[in-house]
Amino acid sequence: MLSRDDWIHRLDSKEIAEIDAAFQQVRDKGISFADMTRENFPLERFPDIAARARETLEMGPGLFLIRGLPTLKYSHRDLRLIYWGLGKHMGTAVCQSSDGDVLGDVRDINVDINGPRGRGYRTNQQLSFHCDSCDVVGLFVLRTPQSGGLSMIASSLAIRNEIARTRPDLLEVLYQPFPWSMQGQEKPGQAPYYPQPVYSDQDGHFCARLVRAHITNAQRFAGAPPLSKAQTEALDLIGELAASEEFHFSMMFEPGDFQLLNNHVTMHSRTAFVDYPEAARKRHLLRMWLSVPNSRPLSPLMGHLARDQTPGAVRGGFPSLADGYVYETPISYGGRPST
């Protein structure tokens, strides 16, 4: 990945000017986040970039980076509007926390990542390799930390194939259900854990999902099946392979970066970081969880993550709102409409 650049697009002056003009139009007309659409955030060049990004995410390495937006000329609110507008041209945003937010702030607020409701994006601690609960995660970089905070991406498919080559016995285990914690978001009368495999296949398409803390947390609950020795060994092996340089690479964010990852075929992590002491300089990213119109079919075994497993469906998001959250109007880019 480091020897190629087909997964990176650096915005040129015309593309930047187009984005700025769309932002100025939204701001001057007083269009709110709730009322913003692709039509009232008009872009002519960016949709081609978005299409290339979606193709690379689904049919290529599962990673795309858009770089070069000049963040210093805008306020934080302006940058939120711009990111939300660009997201409208990428896909459909889904809920990413129990707060119901679809545009999240990634910054350190001293949350314990190992707590029953711990979330990695609210801490400065080292993160283990994991997948987010959506088709595509997008991170928009406003400010970087004083030191650390290296972004690391691993290929879930390469790791799966290595396990198939070296430990086929553990590969079989990873296709079987593991108990996952609901992370305190279960509804009254609902079990605090649910079954879901780490690996699944559907119609020739692979999917990996792993948040090890959620699996570990499920062991707190009476009635949750205890992890077997083989299950623990399989999870350990994924972690070891992902952490090895053979299966991941690292990149340092720059302000203005827009990183996109396909959660079904990549895992991501981040090294610990140290913030600047001044509040105005602390590390700050914006995050969207996106459904995209060219997403792959998913196995029915992934029904907790995706109520609709058909390709192109609007799906994913935080489980606590799975039955009550009303998604924004779905989008279609030709072919099967999102539903």
Image (cartoon, rainbow, N blue to C red):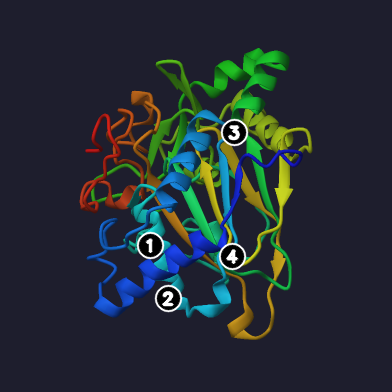
- Single out the residue that lies furthest toward the front: 14
Q: Quadrant of the image for the C terminus?
A: top left
**Nearer to us: label 1 or label 4:** 1
> Residue 290, can we see it?
yes
Say the numbered circle drawn on residue 123. 4
In the rendered view, does 250 fall on the left or right side of 214?
right
Q: What x and y, as percent, mark residue 127?
A: 64, 53
Closer to the N terminus: mark 1 or mark 4? 1
Q: In the image, is 149 to the left or to the right of 245? A: left
Disc with the residue nearer the chain's start (2 vs 4):
2
Q: Is residue 142 above or below residue 12?
A: below
Task: Tell me if mark 2 has few (under 14), some (14-19) or many (20+) residues whose alpha carbon lies within 10 angstroms of its own.
Answer: some
Q: Nearer the viewer, residue 236 or 91?
A: 91
Please name which of the two marks, 2 or 4, marks the residue nearer to the observer.
2
Identify the mark nearer the N-term, 1 or 2: 2
Q: Amino acid at mark 2?
A: Asp
Real-space CA distance between mark 3 and mark 2, rounded to the nearest whole angstrom: 31 Å
Q: Secondary structure at mark 2?
A: helix
Q: Which residue is mark 2?
A: 78
Q: Are marks 1 and 2 in contact (CB under 8 Å)?
A: no
Residue 114 point in image, percent of width and height: 57, 56
